[in-house]
Amino acid sequence: MTRAGFVAVIGAPNAGKSTLVNALVGQKVAIVSDKAQTTRARLMGIAVEGETQILLVDTPGIFEPRRRLDRAMVAAAWTGAEDAELIVLVIDSSTGVTAAVERILAGLETRKHPLIIALNKIDLVKKPALLALSAALTERLNPDKVFMISAAQGDGVPDLKAALAQAMPEGPWLYPEDELSDATDRMIAAELTREQIVNQLYQEMPYATAIETETWEDRPDGATVIRQQILVARDSQKAIVIGKGGSRLKRIGEAARKAIAEHLGRPVHLYLHVKVNPKWDEDRSLYREIGLEWAD
């Protein structure tokens, strides 16, 4: 008897959603950073537990939107929750119920879906505080279960995975057994480059970039040649990305190329250049490329 179903993984920015999705899948399918708002689009990771396929929708963090891109990200998160059989709410237990978490709790009070709460980063919190947080959330949301986990360390993840598998409906698998994500290689390659920009340049320019794939060529010799454009809003940001004598762009490119080659399992030649477009976040085609719906 096989099972398959969708699980929406939601939470505030930097709760550890992508880290948890990667841990459940057993391989990296979502980019990870300790910086908030790293995930932009709904990305699905496919986990297998026995005869069960768990389709994990890694959603952007839910926060107070201020611009079109923000609205599209938040809409993607709530749409992911609506489309799923089950919701997993990931909460950073070291910060507890922040204003961002409070907004999510309010949105879940009238939910129609089963809910599991995953209190993440338990290695940073003392047990009495964890138990108090669990009790308060249980009283407010009446979840099906509460799990205490450390997605980064793997603590509690197997138990959570088993519970998710048990909650999935009976039915055939929806994806081939060797598939780990619904994202295209092109999308993942762009995300891996953006991951390096986020991690290397967060202090100077937190969210002011997007990656556009210009060309992709799989050559007869087995290598892949990729040309990507890094979009920024201002000339000053372009200078930051390039760095002195092109040093920063070179470091970003080297790290991204290595990550993309590891993902694809073949040699990669990656060429990056930086383009200034003050209205890149108003480009409908770019939204389609990164997997977001246009938000009015």
Image (tube, rainbow, N blue to C red):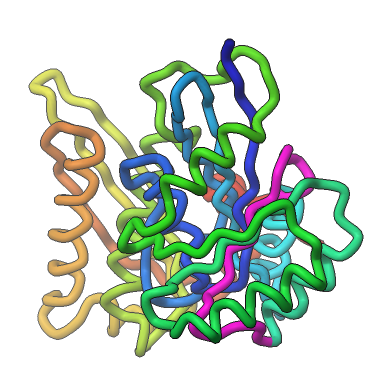
Residue 20 among magenta residues: no
The image shows residue 221, relative to residue 288, as above or below, that is above
The image shows residue 24, relative to residue 74, as above or below, that is above
In the depicted view, which residue is nearer to us: 59 or 278?
59
Image location (x, y in percent) of residue 279:
59, 71
Residue 86 among magenta residues: yes
On the question of residue 211 being in view, the answer is: yes
Image location (x, y in percent) of residue 63:
67, 75
Q: Which residue is drawn at 43% across and 66% down?
A: 231
Magenta-highlighted residues: 81-98
User: Split into 4 quadrants, where in the image is the N terminus?
Assistant: top right
Q: Residue at x 14, y 85 (%)?
A: 244
Image location (x, y in percent) of residue 55:
56, 35
Q: Which residue is drawn at 41% across and 84% down?
A: 205
Relative to 257, is 106 on the left or the right?
right
Image location (x, y in percent) of residue 197:
32, 70
